[in-house]
Amino acid sequence: MIQDLHSHTYYSFCGGDAPETVVEAAIAGGIDVLGITDHNYGVGYGRCDVFLSQYAAGFASTYERMLRKYYDHINLVREKYAGKIEVKRGIELCTLNDVIHPLPDGADISFYDFCLIENLDWKESVTGGDLFAYAKRCGTPIVGVAHTDLFAHIASRGEDPYDYFSRMAENDIFWEMNVSYDPTHHYRVHGYMVDFFADEEKQDIVRRSGVLVSVGFDGHRAADYLPERVREYNEKLIAANIRRPFE
């Protein structure tokens, strides 16, 4: 089973395609499970001019409705393509500590299949670096940590990697291997991901801890999608006997 649990549509201000287009590209590429994970602020505000407006903070009630409308749209897409691919209804949460980026206090996303947390290791993050408290606030059945060097983050907190990853496993939190390689990201390759697959000791810690590890292309344009890259890194996880979400 080949999974890609990180993709963007036109609901993200940086995305370019309809959800249907993104799903069809994944089907054509032989992907079995696709997670659609648009940015919370793109979903919540709906329009970039509203997002950038000085009045953005006053749209809290609209934000809640948009979270539900987005979910409903992705659910219709999920139903439309059932039998060809399994679509997971996700959302990516920016945690930058400003007025407009983070999920508003009290906003409910617990009905989504999963969410991805980004900026965990930034000093400006509303999480304060505390993954477990923020994951509990999210309330989704499973929570992922997107494009983050968790070994470095754990070391910065003076914690033990095995204990930390074990706690993640106990709390249904998975770690993403971000395999993006496209113009949107300037063909950047995440060093933490390359390092992980080259380091048997790190793989052993993760494997023994029981934490789940996902693969996400983080696609923003269907035309730039590289499903063969997604397949390659899924197969690396399978070969390393590291479990993935939704297996």
Image (cartoon, rainbow, N blue to C red):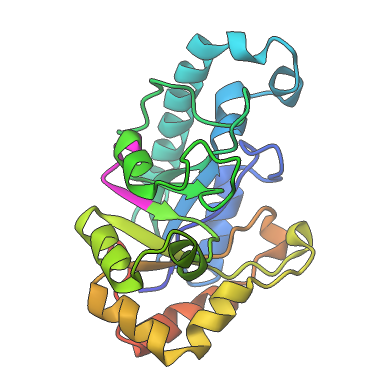
**Above-or-below relation of 7 to 162:** above
Residue 228, x across and y down, in percent = 57, 79
Looking at the image, residue 191 sits to the left or right of residue 103; the answer is right
Q: Range of the magenta residues?
A: 138-143
Please check the rendered image and state whether residue 141 is part of the magenta-colored stretch, yes or no: yes
Identify which residue is drawn at 29% across, 80% down.
Answer: 207
Q: State how many labels appear.
A: 0
Identify which residue is drawn at 60% across, 8% down.
Answer: 58
Tell me if residue 247 can be seen.
Answer: no
Tell me if residue 152 can be seen.
Answer: yes
Location of the C terminus by quadrant is bottom left
Identify which residue is drawn at 36% across, 25% down.
Answer: 108
Location of the N terminus by quadrant is bottom left
The quadrant in which residue 185 appears is bottom right
Please check the rendered image and state whether residue 108 is part of the magenta-colored stretch, yes or no: no
Residue 192, x across and y down, in percent = 57, 73
Residue 244, x across and y down, in percent = 33, 69
**Above-or-below relation of 54 to 205:** above
**Above-or-below relation of 88 to 30:** above
The quadrant in which residue 187 appears is bottom right
Looking at the image, residue 29 sits to the left or right of residue 135; the answer is right
Q: Pick whichever, 51 or 133, lies toward us.
A: 133
**Above-or-below relation of 197 to 5:** below
